[in-house]
Image: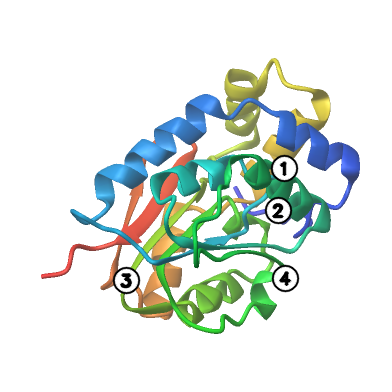
Amino acid sequence: MIRIPEPELMNDPTQVESYAQADFETAHSFLIRKFQDRLPQRFSPVSVLDLGCGPGDMSSRLYSQFPNANFTFVDGSAFMLDLCKKRMDIMVLKKRNQKIEFKKELVQEFVPESSYDLVFSNSLLHHLHDPFEFWAAVQRSIHPDSFIFISDLMRPDSLNMANHLVERYANNEPEVLKRDFFNSLLAAYRLEEIKEMLEIVRLDSKLNLEPITDRHWICYSKPRL
């Protein structure tokens, strides 16, 4: 099935609100466990980048892992970033010298002031019309010892399979969310496409790529020898 791109940003308030109120507990808890399992032992980042933070559900889970780190949350949608900031304001108790930043920037325009120890991104890549803008932003944000963890949806083989996934995992959600999920599945990249991207940007030797569900994949730093 060919890829059908969707809009890069969620700027419709109704759409954003539905996404923010959706129940991602099972999927996001599962993803955080996968993230934890792949971290280096005793990994304690000083600086963390959440690229495409959305409304902040995953961001809050990420912060809980490293509550003493400095965080930068980036999203191109003002609505999404505002929701993320409100969520984080509730749980963040800033420590002395801790830095928490929220930046409204498109991924292709994001140029960090310095590199990050951890670069994390969930469900951003499939929104981009040019995926190499995403990988370029990742490369701009890392140093040789950075840990990278990327996750996103996987495009199914057919429209029938996409409909089946929506019925299985979003059947009780509002229609606007079911429509967004369906469109995101159609806009997602296949594993073989991700593999080719990593080869082109020369990250294939540094990152592992694997499917973790019938609709998700992860990409993460290989252990250092």
Mark 3, Cα crowd under 10 Å, few <14 / some 14-19 / many 20+, is some
Question: Toward the viewer: 64 or 182?
Answer: 64
What residue would you read off at disc 4?
105
The percent coordinates of residue 14 (x first, y second) are 88, 37
Amino acid carrying mark 3 in the image: Asp
What residue would you read off at disc 3?
204
Amino acid carrying mark 4 in the image: Glu
Is residue 13 placed above or below 141 in the rendered structure? above
- Could you tell me which secondary element the residue under label 4 belongs to? loop
Amino acid carrying mark 2 in the image: Ile
**Mark-to-mark CA distance, 4 and 3:** 27 Å
Is residue 131 placed above or below 110 in the rendered structure? above
Is residue 87 placed above or below 72 in the rendered structure? above
**Mark-to-mark CA distance, 3 and 2:** 25 Å
Give whichever of discs 2 and 4 has the lower sequence position.
Answer: 2
Give whichever of discs 1 and 3 has the lower sequence position.
Answer: 1
**Mark-to-mark CA distance, 1 and 2:** 8 Å
Question: What residue sits 74% from the left and 54% below the top?
Answer: 81
What residue would you read off at disc 1?
183
Question: Toward the viewer: 69 or 154?
Answer: 69
What residue would you read off at disc 2?
4
Question: What residue sits 58% from the left and 19% below the top?
Answer: 168
